[in-house]
Structures are given as structure tokens and as C-alpha cells.
Amino acid sequence: MPVLSPQPSLYNDLYQSSPRTAEILKAKTALSQEAEQALIAHIKQLLTAQNAVLVSHYYTSAEIQQLTEETGGCISDSLDMARFGNEHPATTLVVAGVRFMGETAKILNPEKRVLMPTLEATCSLDEGCQAEEFAQFRAQYPEHTVVVYANTSAEVKAQADWVVTSGIALKLVSHLDDLGEKILWAPDKHLGGYVQKVSGAEMVIWPGACIVHDEFKARALHRLKALHPEAAILVHPESPQEVVAMADVVGSTTQLIDAVKRLPNPTFIVATDNGIFYKMQQAAPGKKLIDAPTGGAGATCRSCAHCPWMAMNDLQNLAHILETGANEIVIDEAVRQAAHRSVQRMVEFGRSVRK
Ligand code: SF4
């Protein structure tokens, strides 16, 4: 079994203990259809005037994803977001997602201006793996190759040999295992445990978790599957082991969208953030998508297969940052250079396994 030490300072109760996040979400106001259309037209003008492009994650709202498509931007997982931002000629990248995604864009593109609709959109994996604690953990395993998930701060990435996304984690760890390397993995314990089980690699694993995926429940999933025996179960590997064990397909967001297109099933039970339904419906119109069950009596989060931080990105704050230039990502240059090495290796490894 992996070594689990030390305990991270934050994660499971992070959202509950973040009144600021709750406050921002509560204060969101619904726009009339006319106001929304006017705002969208305004954002489109601002994007063009500022030579800016939108780079959005699959977990953002349907409005943001649609606007991203209409303006020639990119909707994807963290790996492709990083790759797109790096290759696109725009001088401003507007990253709709959570903070580490904006930081990754800046790490790869120091010459570009990187703006985010909100800098308060964080991630429980990032928050639960603070740089100083991670440095202490790492010091216990000087012989290990340090592999960190993209969902970490620039300061943690700066300490890593490799950065990975869920799309390439298994391939990279298997590759390092073939080379005889021992792995220190952080911060997602479920993804790390899954990769360890499948690859057989020798790993020590930091015990972080995603507050969204950690809430999927295997027992309720069994009941839901009994009601929909025709459904295929799709699971992101940040989910608990018992949920992953029930999956017909385990994969990154991009791999799960591909599964909806590829598999003949008419129905899919999806254990990841339901923001992904926008792209799944587009990829396979007519197929039925059902949220995998979260919560149950006593859970901290009931029926909430949606990241509260991703939900903080909206059209209003998007327009605001384009008007004002607020929320620019700034990273200390020494940290950026150290993080660049491991992020660039991720991009290159991702490219090589995609060939
Ligand atoms: S869904 Fe989970 S892993 Fe993704 S940003 Fe939200 S908290 Fe982080």
C-alpha cells in the first residue's frame, strides 16, 4: 500500500469552510435573454479588439463553452488547454476554469497576458497540497521521481520532475516504472491509487481528493445501474476506488467524451462534473446522460456533481476582466522557470503518446 503522510491541511471541508465562494455564487444574478445576448456580443467585440482568445475547461457553464466555440477558442481538459494556449497566436489568453489552469497557461506563455474571470476559483487538490508541506513530504523520498497532477500550484509544480493530467498519468507512470523508477505522486489519492493498481509501479501517494469526485457513491450507483441496465458507466479516476471498479470506461474528460461517441449504449451514467454534458451531448446527440449519484444521508455534498469553483466563471466576470484587465495571472519568474521544465515535459510526453 502507498505511504500516506502527512495529512494535508485542507481539502474535504474546503468548500464548506469557504464563505467567500458561497457568497460569490449566491450573489450571481440571472440575466434576461436580451441582456445575455447583448453581453455576449460585447464580449465578442472585446476579445477581437484585444487579440484575446478564450480557453475554457469542460466543467465551465454551457454559456461559456458556447461562447468559446463561437469565438474560435478551445474547450478541453487541462492538457489540451495548455497546448492550445501555447500554440495560438493571440497575445491574451482568457482562461475560464480554476486558478491552476491560468497559472499553467502563464508558465508556458510568459510573454502573453493571461486573464481569468475570477482568481478565487480554486481546486481542493491544489489547496490541499501546499508547497511547504509538499517540500517536507518530498524530502522524505529523495530517491523517488516526483510526479504531480496538473491540479497543483506553480510552487508545487516547481518542485516536480513531471506534471501530468489524468489523460496521460497511467502512460507516464508505466513508462517510468519500465525505467525502474520509484514514484512520488501528488496530490489526488484516488487517481494515484488507480494508476498504481493498473501499472503496478512502486508509489508513495499524497492523500488529497477532489471534493466533487470524492462524493460519488458506489452503493447508490449500483441502484441506479439496476434502474438503467442498458447504460454504460463512465468514471473519472479522481473518483473513489469502489466507483472506479464499476466503470465500463475509466478515463480523462476527453476520453469519457470519446466513449459516449464510440460506445453503442443509448444511455450513460457519468461520474464526473456534469459541465461535461455540454460536449457529450454535442458529440452524441440523442444519447441519454445521467449524473452518477453523489451524497446520500450524511454526505457533505448532495447531488452536486458540479465544481463550485468552476461555477464561479460567468459572462459578467468575463466581460469585466476584458474591460478592466483585472485578474491577470502573475507568477514569480524563478518559480515559473522551475515549473516550466516539468510542465513542458508534460506537453511533450502528451504529444508523443498521441502520435
Ligand atoms: S472538479 Fe475537483 S479537481 Fe476539478 S477543479 Fe473542481 S475541485 Fe478541482
Image (cartoon, rainbow, N blue to C red):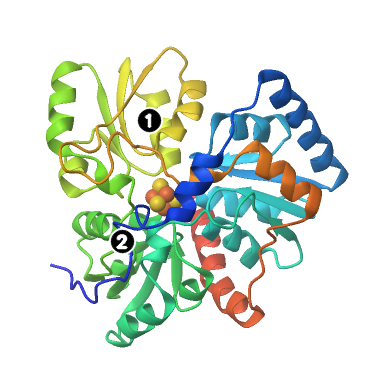
Whether residue 50 sits left or right of residue 66 in the image: it is right
Image position, residue 309 (x, y; %): 48, 48
Q: Check the image and name the residue furthest to the right.
A: 49
Above or below, 118 against 262 in this view is below
Which residue is painted at 38% across and 35% down in the image? 256
Q: Which residue is mark 1?
A: 259
Query: In this orientation, which residue lies closer to the viewer: 309 or 181?
Result: 309
Image position, residue 52 (x, y; %): 78, 47
Distance (Cα) linking label 2 and label 1: 23 Å
Whether residue 252 sits left or right of residue 141 in the image: it is right
Closer to viewer: mark 2 or mark 1: 1
Whether residue 296 sits left or right of residue 166 in the image: it is left
User: How many C-alpha atoms fall within 10 Å of the one at disc 2: few (<14), some, or many (≥20)?
Assistant: some
Q: Which residue is mark 2?
A: 174
Query: In this orientation, which residue lies closer to the viewer: 91 or 147?
Result: 91
Mark 2 within 8 Å of ligand 1, using the beta carbon = no
Q: Check the image and name the residue furthest to the top.
A: 286
